[in-house]
Image (cartoon, rainbow, N blue to C red):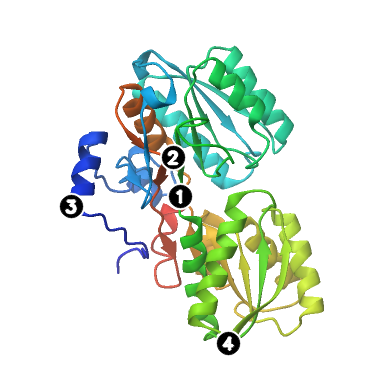
Amino acid sequence: MQRTTHRSRLLTRPALIALAAAMAVTATSCAKSEDDAAGGKKSTAAADAGQKVVTPKPGSKTCTIDAYGGKKIDLKDATVGFSQSEKEANPFRIAETQSIEDEAAERGVKLLTANAQSQFSKQISDVQDLLAKGADLLVIAPLNSDGWDPVLQAAAAKKVPIVTIDRKINATACKDYVSFIASDFVEQGRRAADHMIEATGGKGEVAILLGSAGNNVTTERTQGFKERVAEKAPGLKVVFEQTGDFTREKGQQVTEQLIQSKPGIKGIYAENDEMGLGAVAALKGAGKKAGDIEIVTVDGTRNAVQGVVDGWISGVIESNPRFGPLAFQTLDTFTQGKEVPQDIVIQDSAYSPDNAERDLGKAY
């Protein structure tokens, strides 16, 4: 069996030709490292296989350095600043930072890094500090979508291009930032709903463990899930929604409340793996058995995929954290004066009982 992928993106032939000319990107095809199966560290090339092709989100406009107001530079001579938003206890953030660092090292680019430790005020000061230290280009993984005006103004004053990854900032593309690189979060929600519908038979009461308020990830993963349920399984009712703040501890607390207030709940959609693993802990603590309540999560961490293998989690939609190649390819193309898409989609996969054990080594 092949590893499950649910996404199909079709572009017209003219669009493909235009994109190829604009991006001048060469696809890199390589297999996953055999180290994965042995539990060793994944090689960068293996982990990022297939992610060096820049795929624009359908309908995306493009941006050039002339339109943005920057200056052409050789990426090898530039200093890139990377701002990580959250504590790297989260496997997604570990893999994300590692991908940025590995790609910078592979390209011989000087990289400055900072971690906001899940504090938005610190992230703002972190990025301002990166600019003060001489960053010519910025890659930002935003904690929140709002509140970026101080950073955007400081970067604009120095004509420093910004690429954002994973979470979008509420600002104007090709004016305040160059490109946004992320998964299609609405599609992730739809795919999670497909798994939930299959696991529950499309009937019963389900709950949503919402991510943090104030960012587009939570909004779009919720939107996609509800849209697909309404479309395909009207007999499946969302009867409980509460934020778990993307943390395992809060996910466990909310699930403990859930099984007390809604004892007949049939499924839980956790908008990231950490909350889903918290839900598993709550169910075990309540004396539930694997499969008593179907759990579907989003991320693709090794612990969550192991949960699928063990029967506690019904399905995991991958949210690919390996942004390094796409971020640096976008900056390289942009600083050469060529067009880049304003919205770029990173490819995701998925884990189910059919492939979880076989593909466990591919999880992060």
Give, as a three-letter code, the residue at label 3: Arg
Measured in 3D between alpha carbons, the distance from the residue under mark 3 to the one under mark 1, in whole angstroms, is: 27 Å
Q: Nearer the viewer, residue 106 or 70?
A: 70
Q: Mark 4 points at which residue?
A: 235
As shown in the figure, which amino acid type bears the numbered disc 1? Asn
First of labels 4, 3 by sequence position: 3
Pointer 2 residue: 323
Which one is in front, 328 or 360? 328
Mark 4 and mark 1 residues within 8 Å of each other at the beta carbon = no
Q: Position of residue 245 (x, y in %)?
A: 71, 53
Label 3, residues with CA under 10 Å away: few <14, some 14-19, many ≥20: few
Closer to the camera: disc 4 or disc 3? 3
Q: Residue beneath label 3, please?
A: 13
Separation of marks 1 and 2 at Cα, in angstroms: 8 Å
Q: Label 4 is placed on what type of residue? A: Gly
Question: Residue 123's spot in the image, x, y percent?
Answer: 67, 30
Q: In this view, does 239 lie above or below 7?
A: below
